[in-house]
Amino acid sequence: MISPVLLLFSSLLCHVATAGRTCPKPEELPFATVTPLKLAYDPGEQIVYSCQPGYVSRGGMRRFTCPLSGIWPINTLKCTPRVCPFAGILPNGAVRYSTFEYPSTISFACNTGFYLNGTKSARCTEEGKWSPDLPVCAPVNCPPPPTPKFAVLSISKSLATNSSFSIDSALYGYKAVFKCLPHYAMFGNESITCTEHGNWTELPECREVKCPFPSRPNNGFVNYPAKEALYYQDKATYGCHEKYVLDGPQEVECTKFGNWSAQPSCKASCSVSVKKATVIFEGERVKIQEKFKNGMLHGQKVSFFCKNKEKKCSYTEDAECIDGTLEIPKCFKEHSSLAFWKTDASDVKPC
């Protein structure tokens, strides 16, 4: 029969031995929680490792029992963040991101001419989904363009494709071209463009423009429409009498500023005082007394030959008929037929 004292002593030793084998507070793992979490555990007590919301483990949770040795088993649990679906392509836009893992955030931007229909950014949630839903880049639309007063729509087309479009659905880059009614001049750009902000560029203005009746030039005439008034883009034609040359365009037009595009005048011809000389006219050597026996017209040019006595060579200087005046170069010496022994400057070798 076992002594009661011996039995009490054995029980005390067993209790002391068991109390010495308690397990310590379990190891902390990244993104994981322990249930229950205590500073010490008796042999036989269980703990459960599980990943925090937004993180997952290949093997799921880990359940451990405190052994009699008081040493927790090796824990290989690894909690990794959930991954949201790939969102790297946004048609007509771009996605800015560093990673698609929980709890990262991505942002969105649209190309010029498109706007974000939806959120500017989204977050990868604990469930591995984007929140809010991903947006789309919708094309920018402009309302039907207004038409300037006294104008009509001439052309409507896309700047990108050069194709026509329905004026009720103008997209970014489309343009509308206007034309003013007769007698009205356009001030500003003739076309307006649908901008990236969904509005049109500045509208032009059509104004009625009148010009005064053109005056007749001296020694000439002018013709214009027989009307009570002359308006923008009306035309007038000029001409000169015999032996006069028109200085300026033959036809002029009433401009948007209320004046004529030019004021032509009639210039007189020049009489040639030189009786005998070889000159260059339009690249050819000609006798001036034969070529211009009826005089030179205003604006015509000839080149006279002159001598360089020191170098014994010849050079040319130009002379132009300007409204009845022809100035002969001072270096030119008219050769007399009596001085037959002298060589004409035009026959001397060029310098």
Image (spheres, grey):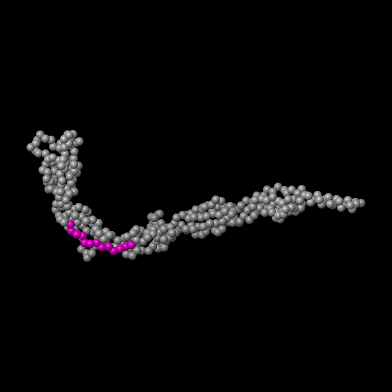
Q: Is residue 251 magenta?
A: no
Spot occupied by residue 86 in the image (x, y as percentages of width and height): 55, 52
Spot occupied by residue 163 in the image (x, y as percentages of width and height): 39, 56
Quadrant in which residue 156 is drawn = bottom left
Q: Is residue 154 visible?
A: no
For the point 77% across and 49% down, which residue is it?
21
- Side (left or right) of 273 relative to 167: left
Position of residue 118 relative to residue 347, above or below, is below
Spot occupied by residue 73 in the image (x, y as percentages of width and height): 72, 48
Give 126 or 29, whichever is nearer the viewer: 29
Pick the quarter of the image with the C terminus: top left
Quadrant in which residue 279 is drawn = top left
For the point 82% across and 52% down, which residue is it?
15
- Side (left or right) of 174 relative to 135: left
For the point 70% across and 47% down, which residue is it?
74
Spot occupied by residue 248 in the image (x, y as percentages of width and height): 21, 53
Q: Is residue 215 magenta?
A: yes
How many discs mark residues in the rendered view? 0
- Side (left or right) of 256 relative to 300: right
For the point 32% across and 60% down, which residue is it?
187
Which contiguous range is marked in magenta?
205-217
- Side (left or right) of 328 relative to 185: left
Q: Residue furthest left?
A: 338
Q: Is residue 276 visible?
A: yes
